[in-house]
Amino acid sequence: MTDAAIKVENITFSYGDLEAVGGISFEVAPGEILGFLGPNGAGKSTTIKILTGQLTPKSGSAQVLGVDVTKDDPEMQAQIGVCFEEKNLYDSMSGQENLKFHASLFGIKDVDTDELLRRVGLADRAKDRVAKYSKGMKQRLMMARTLVNTPKVLFLDEPTDGLDPVSSQSIRKLIQQEADRGAAILLTTHDMNEADELSNRVAFINEGKLYAVDTSENLKLKHGKRSIRVRTRDGAGVTEQIVSLEESGAGEALRAAVGSPNLMTIHTEEATLEAIFIQMTGRGLEG
Amino acid sequence: MSRPVSRASIIGSIVKKDLTEYSRDRLWMFLTLLVLVFMIIVFWVLPDRVDESIPVGISGLGDPAVLVGLESTEEEGLRLVAFDSAGDLRSVVAGDADAWQTNGGVVVIPDNSDAEKPEGAEKANVDIGLAFPADFLTATASGNETTVEIFVDAQVPDELKSSMSSLVRELAFAVAGSPLPVDTANPQEVYTVLGEDRAGNQVTPRESFRPLLVFLVLLMEMFGMSSLIAREVQSKTVTALLVTPATTGDVLAAKGIAGAVLGLGQAVILLAAINVLGSEPLLILTLMLLGAVMVSGAAMVAGSLGRDFLSNLFYGMMFMVPLMIPAFTVLFPGTATGWIQALPSYPLVQGLVKVATYGDGWAEALPDVGALLAWCVALFVLGWVVLKRKVETL
């Protein structure tokens, strides 16, 4: 891949004797969402901290927009946006004041806070102090803060963790809009559906190691069964048939099932990302 | 795309944000105002003069001529209070009765009496009494032996007790018309007062308390700043700052400036209210600015180390207690030993005392300004290291 916005080569990091990141490599292109999928403690947040200059890798190299992340380059930092897992906002200030202050750190004096707050559904709470915001509102304000400098690279650390479905959906929509705008996005999550829905590619990380980096479809094709489960009514009972797509005659069998007046359901038998993750790492995503 | 942003602009933004946060913290705003008002009230309530004379009670001297002779001792700082009887004098010195000075003489009221204080009378605090016997004048004039009782409160220094003995002997020689065994004019005593002669112009309690009051205001600012920094660290908002073009240096510089603005602002209000800025205002403001920066450095260390309000308070106290010691030594002159002089707040207090109390200028206070500047740098570097290490572990 050329012109990667994020380029990571074999980086490592340890907290004392505990290896948090053990030699991982990946790239993220502009306009691409890479879903970093792994359970708590897998090394997702540590990787983001390294890429945003909060931690220095013990070995390996990492570049964001072509700049070595250990260089603490203000010009590079002016073009990234980070959404933290913790709600690190100034509670005594309003949503609008939080955005204006953050924008001022980038030298942006004419930031359109109304538009940003409208995008995250907080326009009517702009002047309320953040201390009065709900958890979901704080998370949406965090996203708005991340976008204040129209970043070329976004690091989103569990942006929908613990949110209600409506708040989660609005944040996912925002993330997709940013990718459509051309931003490279590294999205850490342990929500398989979120990764599946948003990511162009997913990376499986566990205990600091990358197990796979590929599109969801490829992973499912590689690790799932190419078969279809057909259920038909059979008098008072139900008959279930597995049609393997690898075998000849699969087309006729499917046409017959679809034409049957007793057809109840047809399901593909592809594996879920979670099942593939467990298959590859031997560990679930929750926990 | 954002434009390149200057360090000054980033620091200015963080300072503005810090001051906004501080102004919205009702607890610290209340404490800040309370301490400021309290210090101003304390200052103006304190006595602004020193009574340099020692009241000495006497009894048993009927001849006014002798009293006139004794009263010449007022030049030596003794103020005579005449009692009617040795018993009254003894009970007053012993603390069993109060003596009230009226136009008609001294009225003694025992503690267990229901009698009220005479109208318009002023209390005479007598700790030393000379009870002359009725035959003192005739006995000394005829050369016969006689005894003068000297009553002294237990807390009266030994030097004063012995001077009372001398006074009695001197009086006896005067009454007897005999010359003193030693000619007081030979050898002559020449007093050379080194430094400013404060006789008749002693440092008043109000003046002594000035550095302590100013320092307490700065310490309040230290607690306020450390609370602000601790909140920034604990809520991890500092990490949100450091993934922007802002650096650790910018954050520290901003904290220092915000702390200095808050501390200096409060100190200037206090100094103006307690009438200190009149003499060498620029020098005093320089000292206060450095003092405010110094406590901001301490606040950074305390704020970075704390995990919650209580631990923040604990680390704040760890700084506050030693930093306050030099301010207390002003109240007890001569107690500033070597290790006290090595404390960071000593040059600040010393400089303030020199300028505000003794009217010294830049030349005299320059060593203190230099030492204070060095401490500011040291505490800031320490604060930098501690805060940076803390941020790395968030």
Image: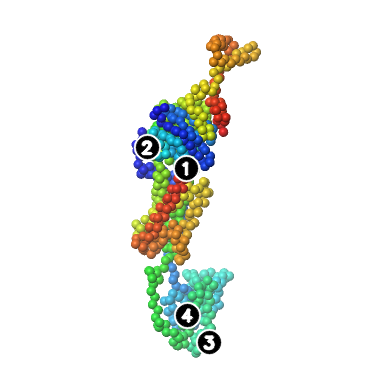
Pointer 1: what residue? B392
Q: What separation in Å lies between label 2 and label 1 (alpha carbons)?
A: 21 Å
Pointer 4: what residue? B167
Q: What separation in Å lies between label 3 and label 4 (alpha carbons)?
A: 17 Å
Q: Where is residue A263 in the image (x, y as percent from the top left)?
A: 58, 13
Q: Do the residues labelled 1 and 3 touch (CB within 8 Å)?
A: no
- Which chain does tag 4 point to? B
Element assignment for label 1: helix
Asked if B12 appears above or below A226 in the picture, the reply is: below
- Which chain does tag 2 point to? A
Asked if A115 appears above or below B139 in the picture, the reply is: above
Of residues B58 and B235, the one nearer the viewer is B235
Q: Do the residues labelled 2 and 1 touch (CB within 8 Å)?
A: no
Q: Position of residue B9 (x, y in %)?
A: 36, 42
Pointer 2: what residue? A75
Q: What residue type is labelled 1?
A: Glu
Q: Which amino acid does label 2 sit on?
A: Glu
User: Do the residues at discs 4 and 2 belong to one chain?
Assistant: no
Q: What separation in Å lies between label 1 and label 4 (alpha carbons)?
A: 75 Å
